[in-house]
Image (tube, rainbow, N blue to C red):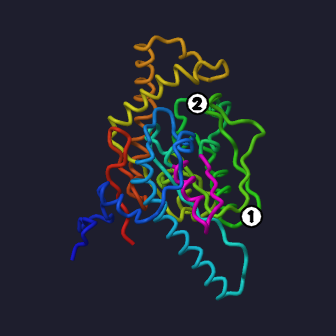
């Protein structure tokens, strides 16, 4: 008999929730966030309200908290079984999605909410941008216009990083990327010290096709290290519009910094800037979305489907 709060399609691996159904699953979980805290987490042109956090992201944090708690319990009983009481390894959450779809904001909100739960207070967030090859390498290989495509990442280094995190190494280091200079920051690293949870956010983190970074045989992929994965989805036309709007906003803000890689666009007239944004979308972001990102959607444990106003309208949760 079908439950009152879900609707299932027999041939789908997912349980589909409307926004109203999903919102109800927060139960009595309180919202541990203020408007001031949310303001820091919002991305450029992201219209995320406290109501959105309460109705869309709080139920997700509750679900993830349950999953993490069960994984921690499994670790405890397994350790008791084999008598090897080593420190439990981090629970890793992967978040994928297109440029401008809002996955970075989603990752920051989830990080903030999960850190409020008492059984996993330490939550680190890693963006795979840090594992892009430096611009000098991309230029040498003719890949500057393929930045964000799978071949533009140091995939071996990313896999090694995740393997070290999952093996429980006391300290693991991730390179840092600057969106201002559009390049890796030489000599700067982010240090991961055995947190309870690590969130890994990136364009193609769910990809398994192509040469995506095998260290040995059998091949390994980034998603092999995920305990749970999320895909942030939206209509392509909406994502394209969001990208153009973000580009125009950055033209008035970050691009005006003389250190910005895109400083040349700050002086463009609005109509010309729109043309440039459209060109970048059609030459880089759209092909990457269609060829490498969107095809991985159904590998995710959970899909957040966003509407034109950026709000989550439907949630698809993979059946166990």
Nearer to us in this view, 218 or 5: 5
Picture layout, residue 50 above or below residue 237: below
The span from disc 1 to disc 2 (Cα, nearest Å) is 36 Å
Question: Horizontal and vertical percent for residue 285?
Answer: 44, 34
* Residue drawn at the location 61% of the way across and 84% of the way down: 77
Residue sitting at the far left: 1
- Corner quadrant of residue 176: top right
Q: Which residue is drawn at the image coordinates 40% and 29% (left, top)?
A: 282
Question: Does 124 lie within the magenta span?
Answer: yes
Residue 169 numbered tag:
1
Image coords of residue 41 (percent x, y): 55, 42
Q: Residue 83, percent across and down?
A: 71, 87
Q: In terms of secondary structure, where does tag 1 sit?
A: loop
Question: Which residue corresponds to mark 2?
Answer: 142
User: As drawn, is 14 to the left or to the right of 29?
Assistant: left
| Position of the C terminus by quadrant | bottom left
Magenta span of residues = 107-127
């Amino acid at each position: 008999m079908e439950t009152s709060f879900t609707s299932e399609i027999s041939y789908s691996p997912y349980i589909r929730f409307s926004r109203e159904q999903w919102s109800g699953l927060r139960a009595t979980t309180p919202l541990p966030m203020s408007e001031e805290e949310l303001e820091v987490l919002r991305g450029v042109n992201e219209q995320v309200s406290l109501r959105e956090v309460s109705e869309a992201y709080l139920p997700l944090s509750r679900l993830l908290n349950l999953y993490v708690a069960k994984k921690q319990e499994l670790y405890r009983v397994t350790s008791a079984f084999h008598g090897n009481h080593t420190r439990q390894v981090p629970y890793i959450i992967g978040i994928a999605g297109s440029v401008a779809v809002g996955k970075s904001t989603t990752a920051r909100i989830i990080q903030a909410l999960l850190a409020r739960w008492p059984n996993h207070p330490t939550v680190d967030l890693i963006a795979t941008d840090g594992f892009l090859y430096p611009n000098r390498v991309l230029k040498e290989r003719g890949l500057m216009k393929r930045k964000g495509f799978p071949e533009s990442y140091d995939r071996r280094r990313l896999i090694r990083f995740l393997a070290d995190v999952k093996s429980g190494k006391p300290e693991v280091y991730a390179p840092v990327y600057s969106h201002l200079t559009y390049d890796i920051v030489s000599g700067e690293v982010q240090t991961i010290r055995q947190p309870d949870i690590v969130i890994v956010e990136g364009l193609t983190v769910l990809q398994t096709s192509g040469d995506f970074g095998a260290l040995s045989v059998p091949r390994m992929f980034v998603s092999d290290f995920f305990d749970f994965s999320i895909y942030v989805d939206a209509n392509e036309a909406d994502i394209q519009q969001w990208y153009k709007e973000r580009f125009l906003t950055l033209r008035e803000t970050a691009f005006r910094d003389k250190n910005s890689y895109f400083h040349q666009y700050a002086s463009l007239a609005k109509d010309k800037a729109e043309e440039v944004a459209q060109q970048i979308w059609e030459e880089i972001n759209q092909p990457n979305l269609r060829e490498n990102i969107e095809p991985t959607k159904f590998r995710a444990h959970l899909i957040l489907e966003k509407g034109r106003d950026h709000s989550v309208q439907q949630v698809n949760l993979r059946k166990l």
